[in-house]
Amino acid sequence: MADFLSILARAPLFMGFDEHTISLILEAQGAQLARYARGEVLLREGERTDKFGIVVDGTISIEQNDFWGNRNLMGRISAGLIFAESFACSRPQRPLAVNVVADSGCVVYWLDCHRLLQQGSLDEKVWRTLVANLIHVLSNKNIRFNEKVTHMGQRTTRDKLLSYLSMESRKAHSAVFDIPFNRQELADYLGVERSAMSACLGKLRDEGMLTFDKQHFHLLEVE
């Protein structure tokens, strides 16, 4: 546990807590530590879970597959972030609509959502802060989901790209920024064909609207 406390201390769920308090919270909540190999499925579509995870090492992907096996990348979860909390906390409990897959070897703490929502042996102030943090995390995730819907709601691959890159620029408060996806992952995230997206990026570059190098982008003003 000690190896991961410094990571958890920077996690949004534990904002405002020192490492000692986080250790007490994990113990009181009966948190379980699990390790997964690259490509291993942590949770499968159709399953139900009363636990959500917080990644403390490595990364995982949230994926959705259609009838024909085409992958839609919903998001990537890195160290310090939580996943499956909406399904774990839902009542009546809803089956997962996604698969959770380890991108690399990863380590996850599992927490029982409904146990967390009960004060139990935790100090009242600690418990209230923990629940407030969980609400903030849920709210921010809802905002990010709405952002994805905004991008995917655009009619063309070009419009989807411009919508996504414009929002990433606003988040970075700069025309120069890095994105968290490689080309295939970005295509999956936007729900477009990789070849068509790559061609569109090349055209946007030729038009003088942007430059890029792998995951590094620079948006340019067009005169």
Image: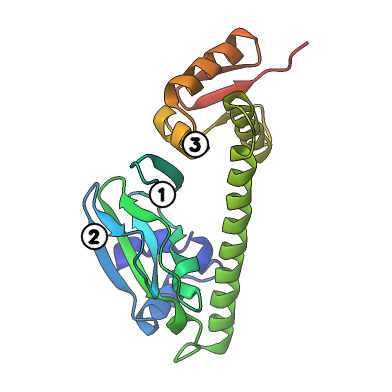
Q: Is residue 194 above or below residue 70?
A: above
Residue drawn at (59%, 39%) of the image: 152
- Asked if the residue under mark 2 is in contact with the one under mark 3, i.e. CB atoms within 8 Å, the reply is no
Q: Position of residue 129 (x, y in %)?
A: 58, 77
- Which mark is in front, 3 or 2? 3
**Can you tell which mark lies on residue 191?**
3
Q: SS at mark 3?
A: loop
- Spot the residue most to the front: 67
Residues 167 and 50: in front is 50
Q: Position of residue 66 (x, y in %)?
A: 40, 46
**Number of marks in the image?**
3
Query: Which residue was labeled with disc 2?
Result: 35
Q: Position of residue 196 (x, y in %)?
A: 48, 20
Q: Is residue 190 above or below residue 64?
A: above
Q: Tell me the quadrant of the picture where the C terminus can be found.
A: top right
- Quarter of the view holding residue 174: top right
Query: Which residue was labeled with disc 1?
Result: 64
Whole-number angstrom distance, CA of label 3 to CA of label 1: 11 Å
**Can you tell which mark lies on residue 194?**
none
Kind of residue at badge 3: Gly
- Quarter of the view holding residue 55: bottom left
Other residues around mark 2 within 10 Å, as few (<14) / some (14–19) / many (≥20): some
Whole-number angstrom distance, CA of label 2 to CA of label 1: 23 Å
